[in-house]
Image (cartoon, grey):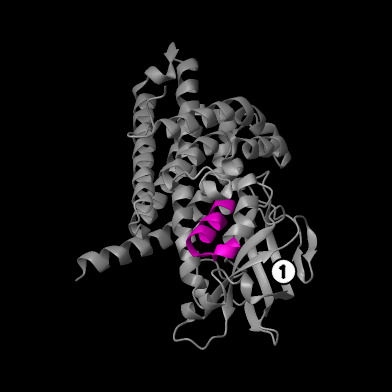
Amino acid sequence: MARLAQTSDLSDVQKEILATVRRFVDRDVIPAAQELEHADAYPERIVETMAAMGLFGLTIPEEYGGLGESLLTYALVVEEIARGWMSVSGVINTHFIVAYLLMRHGTPEQRERLLPRMASGELRGAFSMSEPDVGSDVAAIRTKATPAPDGGFVLSGRKMWLTNGARSGIVATLVRDELGADGPHRNMTAFLVEKEPGFGTTRPGLTIPGKLEKMGYKGIETTEMLLDDVRVSGDDVLGGPGRRGRGFHQMMDGIEVGRVNVAARACGIALRAFELAVAYAGRRSAFGRPIAEHQAIAFKLAEMATKVEAAHLMTVNAARLKDAGGRGDVEAGMAKLLASEYCVEVTQEAFRIHGGYGYSKDAEIERLMREAPFLLIGEGTSEIQKTIISRGLLREYGA
């Protein structure tokens, strides 16, 4: 067993799940990732296998057909999957956030209706806050909900950066709700918008135009979502009609666990980059001996391994804190900040160790070099994480 990124005090069930996922990644994901990524092709067979393994329902309670596992288990599974190919972890990330929102904030009826189908993978989830020209300034979103005479709502606007935007059948969507409350964040409501999977018009007024082209994170689609007088009912409000105006707080709760997920993805990529670097350094010779025996390379490997281990430990800590019911905004922000920055640094060092070969599209490290930067901006930039961390610390120490 590898020395790095090991987690103490896991149950036998957790160990078996992780061992099963690692075998799956080594057997099915890593051998196929290069070809699929370069072709920007959706990993159909890999996703079918994940559904059969129960990974879409990993954290969904057993009463709804899931495995009922913790955020820690999920984070460690994501780390393993991202080690193989980050895009595959993206298939279940937003799905997981929507399931989490339902479990935490949904009505009993919403949970009964949606979670069993999500656990099986039949119904896929997507998560939508961002809009063009908005980014991290969530208070500035313009997509709005207008009350209708029948007690429902009409949604209009343009949403951006939906992972699983086409293949999802339900999108947790944050919109502006003109409640007249004190403060912009209290005038936001989260809706569970159901649609048919696919591109084009997927329900009256709702259009998924097509895939957005990206430098990395390929294979899985990222899309816009256009809402043109989409009619929804009061029962489509996350938590029911009485939870209007709570959308910002609900979605931020989902983002907090999403940051643990992004940190775990960063750990997986960094670990794979280190594995590739140490293997290449052992077989590539220069000046009569393997380059791993040169101090310049050996020191790089030592620093890379230390960063992999530090990021993993902070991610595990953040997941365990959230599982224990504690407030984890600072810890999740720290884990996401450190893991994403270290991931880019470790990947770049691995690229340098590969030399000219690393610049070839035949080299796996070339793909990791294009994937790692996404983690610096996904679920909030490093600057946003620093804002969250500093505010949390000032709450504790400023008094």
Q: Is residue 188 above or below residue 181?
A: above
Q: Main secondary structure of the magenta part?
A: helix
Q: Residue at x 52, y 42 (%)?
A: 67
Q: Position of residue 74 (x, y in %)?
A: 48, 43
Q: Residue furthest front?
A: 63
Q: Position of residue 29 (x, y in %)?
A: 62, 31
Q: Is residue 175 left or right of residue 342?
A: right
Q: Is residue 25 above or below residue 267?
A: above
Residue 198 magenta: no
Q: Residue at x 44, y 10 (%)?
A: 288
Q: Is residue 117 left or right of residue 247?
A: right
Which sits in the foreground, 175 or 296? 175
Crowdedness of circle 1 by 10 Å Cα count: few (<14), some, many (20+)? many
Q: Is residue 371 above or below residue 359?
A: below
The image quarter containing residue 125 is bottom right
Q: Amino acid at mark 1?
A: Leu
Q: Residue furthest top?
A: 288
Query: Range of the magenta residues?
Result: 95-110
Q: Residue at x 45, y 62 (%)?
A: 253
Q: Which residue is mark 1?
A: 226
Which sits in the foreground, 252 or 113? 113
Residue 97 magenta: yes
Q: Position of residue 346 (x, y in %)?
A: 43, 37
* Residue 370 visible to an observer of this rendering: no
The image quarter containing residue 316 is top left
